[in-house]
Image: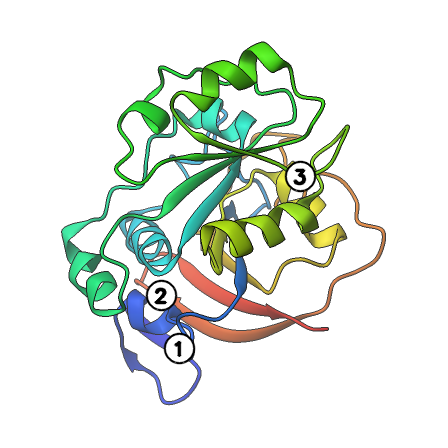
Amino acid sequence: MRQLLPDPPGDVAPYDAYRPADPWANLVRVNMVSSVDGRVTDEHGGSAGLGGPGDLEVFRALRALADGILTGAGTVRSEGYGPHRLHASVAGRRREDGRPEPAAMIVLSGSLDLDPDSAIFTEARTPTIVLTCESAPPERRARLRRVATVIDAGEQTVNLEAGIERLRGECGLAHLLVEGGPRVNRALFAAALVDELCLTLASQLAGTGEGPGIIGGSLPAGVALSLGTVLTDGRDLFARYTVER
């Protein structure tokens, strides 16, 4: 991978380019891939057709750096999510940083409309966490408790700020990687909970009409970003932005 920013330019491993100065500091990162025309899904409704090999390399590095990987229930269903599996290219680096086990998957769901027999639960080495609210259906809660850690945050809807506090205080998950989708991203940005945006700009026009963008809907106010790192594999661009406070 070629680093374009910051200076000096040169070859770099994505794990090093995205590794925080303090690997154990509290951090909420949003990772997304987008086509040049601003779409985050391909013609099949998923994101797999947008990114190339470089995006996969960055994806693996970002996951290896995190304590927990947060995603919405809709993304879990549409993308067929499984547990975090450490790739050999980054497993050693993660162990060196003091994280020998895969990151915990965290599924955000107020309704608990999740299949307890799916791989994200049954094949997880690190137990999956479900972040929900007190009003979630009790029968679904009971089924999921057999295969996952279920955490309440909020009464009628999931309170993301309270949920992140519980993930950090009770589960020790300081560094959270968010893989969306757009509705989850919007809620996190609207609540001013995001520290960084890691964006892959895929070298293609998706041409999927009114498909979703990075943010699912409008925000109450604009969010200023500071560009910190830009990488390229000769095909796509990989940008790392810091949210200005």
Front in this rendered view, residue 165 or 3:
165
Local SS, label 1:
strand
Q: Would you call the spot at circle 3 few (<14 residues within 10 Å), some (14-19), or many (20 or more)?
A: many
Left or right of residue 202, residue 195 in this image: right
- Residue 232 is tagged as 2
Front in this rendered view, residue 217 or 84:
84
Q: Residue at label 1?
A: 4
Local SS, label 3:
loop
Front in this rendered view, residue 202 or 99:
99
Q: Residue at label 3?
A: 153
Q: Give residue 187's quadrant in the image.
A: top right
- Residue depicted at x 68% and y 48%: 162
Distance from disc 3 to disc 1, alpha carbons, whole Å, reads 41 Å
Q: Give residue 227's quadrant in the image.
A: bottom right
Q: Residue furthest bottom?
A: 8
Query: Considering the image in quadrants, where does the N terminus appear?
Result: bottom left
Left or right of residue 19, residue 93 in this image: left
Q: Residue furthest top?
A: 139
- Look at the picture and state if 25 lies above or below 53: below
- Residue 185, image x, y percentages: 63, 46
Label 1 near label 2: C-beta < 8 Å? yes
Label 3 near label 2: C-beta < 8 Å? no
- Look at the picture and state if 43 lies above or below 129: above
- Mark with earlier residue (2, 1): 1
- Look at the picture and state if 146 lies above or below 107: above
- Residue 214, image x, y percentages: 61, 46
Q: Is residue 44 visible?
A: no
Query: Which amino acid type is marked by label 1?
Result: Leu
Left or right of residue 54, residue 139 in this image: right
- Look at the picture and state if 141 lies above or below 79: above
- Residue depicted at x 79% and y 44%: 218
